[in-house]
Amino acid sequence: MTQLDDLEDIPGPEGQLTLKLVATPRDTNLHGDISAGWVVSQMEQAAELTAARLAHGRTATVAITGMDFLCPVRLGSLVQIYTELQETGTSSMKYNVQVWILPPNEKDPDSLYKVTEATFVMVALDEKGRIRTLPGQI
């Protein structure tokens, strides 16, 4: 096995970098930790941004599945959220959303740690909030 083969076995983010932000003191819970709820909120925002582009408008989250937290998010971490379209239906879009962090004071900018991932199912909505067909679907 070559050194290049070793590099290919190292897992990394999959999909498109959609959001990049720093976890700040205002994002902490009452114990001073970055809460899971804040992380999920950022994931939903990333899914919504990506889905709205495909839907050419308003979308809503209808399901979130398969979420486990692998490591904590520390205050000051650079949080990077990646989205990848898995499939589309007549009005729905299924995205894999991954969260990776660069911890504060990390010297190597390539030392990302996976926090969590989940599947987000989004639907296109019309101006009245009703489910509508995605553009290009008939």
Image (cartoon, rainbow, N blue to C red):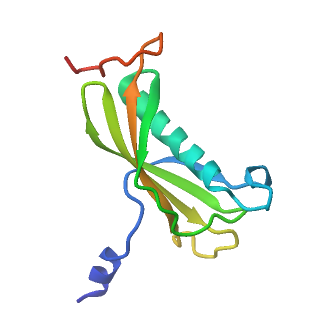
Residue shown at the point (75%, 55%) measured from the top left: 28
In this view, 79 is above or below 127: below
Give the image location of residue 6, x and y in percent: 32, 83
Is residue 78 toward the left or the right of residue 51 in the image? right
Is residue 124 toward the left or the right of residue 87 in the image? right
Residue that lies at the very extreme toward the top in this rendered image: 128
Is residue 5 toward the left or the right of residue 125 in the image? left
Q: Quadrant of residue 106?
A: bottom right
Q: Nearer the viewer, residue 53 or 31?
A: 31
Give the image location of residue 78, x and y in percent: 63, 59
Give the image location of residue 32, x and y in percent: 79, 61
Q: Nearer the viewer, residue 42 or 11?
A: 42
Residue shown at the point (52%, 64%) measured from the top left: 69
Is residue 14 toward the left or the right of residue 110 in the image? left
Residue shown at the point (44%, 28%) measured from the top left: 52
Residue shown at the point (47%, 15%) measured from the top left: 129
Q: Nearer the viewer, residue 33 or 55?
A: 33
In this view, 108 is above or below 32: below
In this view, 16 is above or below 14: above
Residue that lies at the very extreme toward the left in this rendered image: 138
Give the image location of residue 37, x and y in percent: 62, 50
Assign the N terminus to one quadrant of the image: bottom left
Q: Number of callouts in the render?
A: 0
Assign the C terminus to one quadrant of the image: top left
